[in-house]
Image (tube, helix red, strand yellow):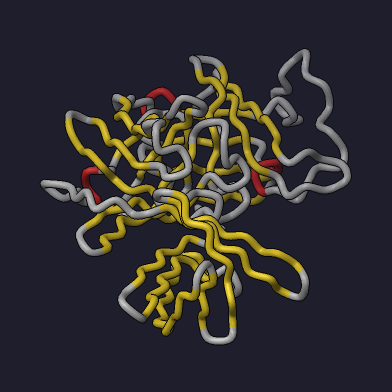
Amino acid sequence: MQKQIWDFGKDSLSIISYGDLASDELDKILQRHIAYHLRGNKLILDADTILVDQREDTLILVLNRNSMLDSMVYFKLQSQKLNPSIKHKDFLGTWIISNSYNQDTLSFINDSILLYNGIYHREKPVNAWDIIDYKGVQMLWIQNPQDPLLQISKNANGQLLFIYPPLPTDTLRMETVDSVSIHSRIWGNWISPYTNEERIEGFPSPPFPLADNDSLTIRKLRFERDSVIFFKGKKVEKISYDLSSDGRRIYFPDRLYSKDGTWKIISLDDKALHFETHLIPNQFDPNFKRLSFYRMKNDSI
């Protein structure tokens, strides 16, 4: 979904587009100015004639393209401004975002990247984000094309309220989640049940063939304070890692946008770590795979 603001002047229209879908540069901002004329219910932009249906704070535009009707719906931007204005640092941490119909969890890990930790956006949990300030009105922009621009209406007491134009009577809110430190709980050596050495009893052989996914080649791993060592047969790899502040996702900063740049923790206790990783779909494997590692009794690998 293209995120746009249409700003009508007396005889000129400014169109601000957030994300260039044609080039897949979703963080790109495009702006153009077009002269327009309004004749009855027809909006004339250059060579295009668009039918206009205005209903209170909603603008429905219908464009006839090659005998196909293309409808676009725009909602009036409220003039409400935040005082004081919100900063990027105010978002850092984990939040529950919800309205009457849906709920999800977002972790803002820095001033430009967030992680989805709930049930939505499983295929692409990593997204860029930013705060857009348009004429003093602040909005939350998330790179995912499915997420609309959200106008921030209130910032107080660990809670953010948003104006969500498609559902103007339904409050969209974000509430902070207490930080949970589980780093020390995952430190140490872990082994896959499919490893030939120290095979875990009661587990079947691994599915065949294995998908082309880096996580599935790991047979043992060692979590240290800020790095993890992967043992893949004779190959050893050491990379940095961190955890979302709610302790629900392990992420690898150096390969965040790869297909297994994050692991969603399903459960963790003294004996086992179960997580979900995203696989490139093929005829043998589903999109997602749950993997398990078990704490080794012997600290040496």
Q: Nearer the viewer, residue 38 or 160?
A: 38
Q: Nearer the viewer, residue 55 or 123?
A: 55
- Quarter of the rendering occupied by the N terminus: bottom right
Return the residue found at the far front. Answer: 40
- Quarter of the rendering occupied by the C terminus: top right
Q: Quadrant of residue 243?
A: top left
Residue 213 place in picture, x, y as percent: 70, 48
Q: Is residue 170 above or below residue 272?
A: below
Q: Quadrant of residue 170?
A: top left
Name the side, left or right, on which 255 lies relative to 279.
Answer: left
Q: Nearer the viewer, residue 266 or 95?
A: 95
Q: Is residue 270 above or below residue 69?
A: above
Q: Residue at 26% x, 42% y: name it.
A: 153
Name the side, left or right, on which 245 lies relative to 156.
Answer: right
Residue 20 place in picture, x, y as percent: 52, 71
Residue 255 visible to the viewer: no
Name the side, left or right, on which 89 lies relative to 253.
Answer: left
Residue 92 visible to the viewer: yes
Q: How many numbered marks appear?
A: 0
Q: Residue at 66% x, 30% y: name it.
A: 291
Residue 274 place in picture, x, y as percent: 59, 25
Residue 22 place in picture, x, y as percent: 60, 73
Return the residue found at the far left. Answer: 84
Q: Residue at 57% x, 36% y: name it.
A: 120
Q: Residue at 62% x, 28% y: name it.
A: 191
Q: Is residue 173 above or below residue 18?
A: above
